[in-house]
Amino acid sequence: MFKTIAETATSEVIEKKSKFIADAFYVETVEEAEEKIKEIRKKYYDAKHHCFAYSICTNSGSIDRFSDDGEPSGTAGAPMLNILNSQNLSNIVVIVTRYFGGILLGTGGLLRCYSEATKQALDSVDKAEKDLGLIVKFIVAYEDLEKIKYYFKQEDIKIIDFNYAENVEISVEITEEKYQKMLKNIKNFNFKVKEQKVVRKSFIALSKKEEN
């Protein structure tokens, strides 16, 4: 289980005529994070520095990366990543673009501004709790439809799609833990599952929002 941002965030910090623009995005893969970085570079094509940090949750652990993008080492990307880690945020990329104002800020000033822009962006949006999970399709007979729907409701498993054919195909979002529990006890249920298969990995929202 991890926390992430519930929506796109942005903020702006100005220090001695230098402008720091922070953009934060929810992402699910390294490829998505890298694509967001490219988009920001293109959007602010006339800025010299596009420093970033991201943290991505995977089955084998967290992937954390950062870049100072030409700023003095340790003044931008690393402190930005430290903020993400200190707030236990994952599946997120933050890019801070800097427009130089003509006055040198020094390493302390840079570290402070990149950190402040990142914090302001993160503080401006709600957070959501998510977990690694699955999209699973279950096939049941029509007479068992209401029984399995009741089970999913009791277990707080989200139904995302129905397909009515010879039997009923029900697609759900389910955490790995709940799925394994279901497989272990499926013989004892008062409904029968004719077939079930994992469609793909997913990230399951555990709660709507968390107040800042």
Image (cartoon, rainbow, N blue to C red):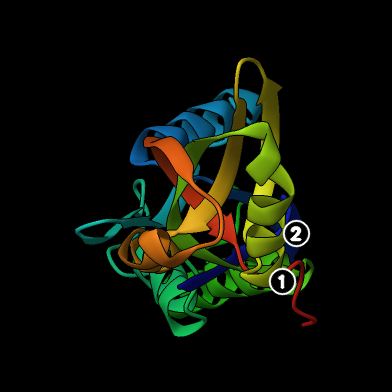
Asked whether 60 or 169 is in front, the reply is 169
Q: Is residue 101 visible?
A: no
Q: Earlier in the sequence, mark 2 or mark 1?
A: 2
Q: Is residue 152 visible?
A: yes
Rendering coords of residue 205 (x, y %): 62, 60
State the mark number for residue 11. 2
Q: Is the C-beta separation of discs 2 and 1 under 8 Å? A: yes
| Badge 1 element | helix
- Quarter of the N terminus within the rendering: bottom left
Residue 195: image quadrant is top left
Q: How many marks?
A: 2
Instruction: Look at label 2 and name its amino acid.
Output: Ser
What residue do we see at 38% from left, 69% from top?
A: 181
Q: Is residue 150 left or right of residue 171?
A: right
Q: Is residue 35 left or right of residue 99?
A: left
What residue do we see at 68% from left, 55% from top?
A: 147
Instruction: Look at label 1 and name its amino acid.
Output: Gln
